[in-house]
Image (cartoon, rainbow, N blue to C red):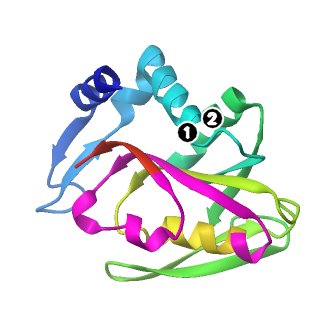
Amino acid sequence: MGELVADVRQTIRDIPDFPKPGILFKDITPVLADPKLFSRVIDWMSLQFSDVDLVIGIESRGFIFGAALVEKLGKGLVLARKAGKLPHTTASKEYDLEYGTATIEMHTDSFKRGAKVLVVDDLLATGGTAHAAVSIARELGAEVVGCVFLIELDFLKGRQKLGCPSASLIHY
């Protein structure tokens, strides 16, 4: 794993002052553009929580990792989307942002009661979005096996909000 961590760290691009002054943005697009490295990341993710029925991908970069992960695991993908983007009956959860709130939704028929689900996203920061996805899944009767992320910003302590096991490849 040490070699994978080093390769991903070397590939992630730092963008200063994006999206606003004072923020150092961790750009993962070079990781996505490298098929061998991206495949190794998905291999690592697939080994963290392999006993799952479905993967929940959080909008939007979680869709990328989620789609690749379900292909690797041979499982289905559930989308956790911004409010108003899903066409069928939804369950929703509001969560706090730095300035205001946001809401994510999932279809109410996304999985059967007792389904084992894994939540995936590119980044764990404050934990609000991932916690909202975990909460909706539980409200709909799923068993949340865990959450998996490419990057975790440890200093924001988002892991503490999740209420389930989690794994992150890169820690800042």
Residue 60 visible to an observer of this rendering: no
Q: Residue at x 34, y 62 (%)?
A: 125
In this view, the residue in front, 20 or 98, is 98
In this view, the residue in front, 70 or 142, is 142
Q: Position of residue 154 (x, y in %)?
A: 26, 58
Element under label 1? Answer: helix
The residue where tag 2 is placed is 69
Residue 92 visible to an observer of this rendering: yes
Image quarter of residue 143: bottom right
Other-residue count near label 1 (Cα within 10 Å), few / some / many at <14 / 14–19 / ≥20: many
Judge left or right: residue 150 versus residue 91.
left
Q: Is residue 5 above or below residue 116?
A: above
Q: Residue at x 17, y 59 (%)?
A: 23
Q: Which mark is residue 1?
A: none
In the image, which residues are magenta?
A: 138-166
Q: Amino acid at mark 2?
A: Leu
Q: Which mark is residue 65?
A: 1
Q: Residue furthest top?
A: 36
Q: Are marks 2 and 1 in contact (CB under 8 Å)?
A: yes
Q: Quadrant of the N terminus?
A: top left
Q: Amino acid at mark 1?
A: Phe
Q: Residue at x 49, y 80 (%)?
A: 95
Q: Residue at x 59, y 33 (%)?
A: 46
Q: Position of residue 134 (x, y in %)?
A: 61, 67
Magenta run includes residue 155: yes
Q: Position of residue 73 (x, y in %)?
A: 70, 31
**Mark-to-mark CA distance, 2 and 1:** 6 Å
Q: Position of residue 148 (x, y in %)?
A: 50, 48
Element under label 2? Answer: helix
